[in-house]
Amino acid sequence: AQSVTQPDIHITVSEGASLELRCNYSYGATPYLFWYVQSPGQGLQLLLKYFSGDTLVQGIKGFEAEFKRSQSSFNLRKPSVHWSDAAEYFCAASGGSNYKLTFGKGTLLTVNP
Amino acid sequence: DAGVIQSPRHEVTEMGQEVTLRCKPISGHNSLFWYRQTMMRGLELLIYFNNNVPIDDSGMPEDRFSAKMPNASFSTLKIQPSEPRDSAVYFCASTQDGQTGELFFGEGSRLTVL
């Protein structure tokens, strides 16, 4: 069965520290991969996406993610976290042109001053 | 540009009552999705419309749930009768054909059924 796993339910980092949020997927073939962010009381916003090609993708708000086929991973990174990055982050995948997104359970990010 | 607009933002109702949630997708988008978010189950796709036609409703929990899209700019999700286990945040999202996975979400409707 297709699945997306985010191993960390909650991560706390200090402002200015680097960040890496983990995401692993299980699909029959390489899926399309996405990271979304949800601020409190808001809907989800797309941060970045990977379809094919360069395995390091850049997104909005200074985020990047790296696709590693050998590890079935698509981890999200940011070199220096800002207090405004505190939110919940969702990794998602779809089977190519399939419209159906499978979301991970999310990782809640807390940023300490 | 206006994003996806959902109403109401919050709804508190009693068990057995009818609930109607509304969504206006982004103009020009022809795909519309209804999702439900709970702590236990995360984000679940309830139903997907393309060009106003329901394509996949396999995620609709049971017959108490129904969704319509009478035109390209409006959709409703109805629960009748509502039950406490329906308490959740319901999101509407839209996108254009070819924008696989690139969904634009509304701010959600938080439903509490007492």
Image: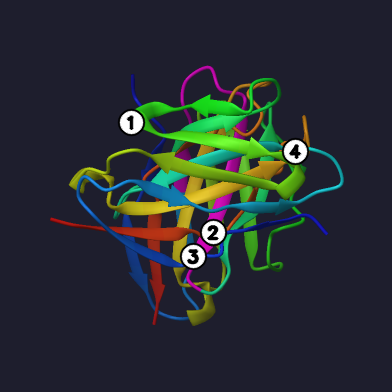
Q: Inspect the magenta stretch and tell me whether residue B27 lies in it.
A: yes
Residue type, mark 1 in image? Lys
Residue type, mark 3 in image? Asp
Q: CA distance from mark 1 to mark 2?
A: 26 Å
The residue mark sitting in front, 4 or 3, is 3
Q: CA distance from mark 1 to mark 4?
A: 24 Å
Is the stretch drawn in magenta largely helix, strand or loop?
strand
Q: CA distance from mark 4 to mark 3?
A: 21 Å
Q: Are marks 1 and 2 on the same chain?
A: no
Callout 1 touching callout 4 (CB < 8 Å):
no
Q: Chain of mark 3?
A: A
Please provide percent x and percent y for residue A45: 42, 38
Q: Are marks 2 and 4 on the same chain?
A: no
Please provide percent x and percent y for residue A100: 71, 43
Q: Chain of mark 1?
A: A
Q: Quadrant of residue A37?
A: top left
Q: Of the numbered discs in the image, which one, if any, rests on residue A61? A: 1
Callout 2 touching callout 3 (CB < 8 Å):
no
Q: Are marks 2 and 3 on the same chain?
A: no
Element type at mark 3: loop
Q: Which residue is mark 3?
A: A8
The answer to whether residue A44 shows anywhere in this view is no
Q: Which residue is mark 2?
A: B36
Q: Chain of mark 4?
A: A
The residue mark sitting in front, 2 or 4, is 4
| Residue A39 drawn above or below residue A57 | below
Badge 1 or badge 4: first in the primary sequence: 4
Q: Residues within 10 Å of mark 2 (few under 14, many from 20)?
A: many
Q: Residues within 10 Å of mark 4 (few under 14, many from 20)?
A: many
Magenta-highlighted residues:
B22-39
Callout 2 touching callout 4 (CB < 8 Å):
no
Q: Which residue is mark 4?
A: A31
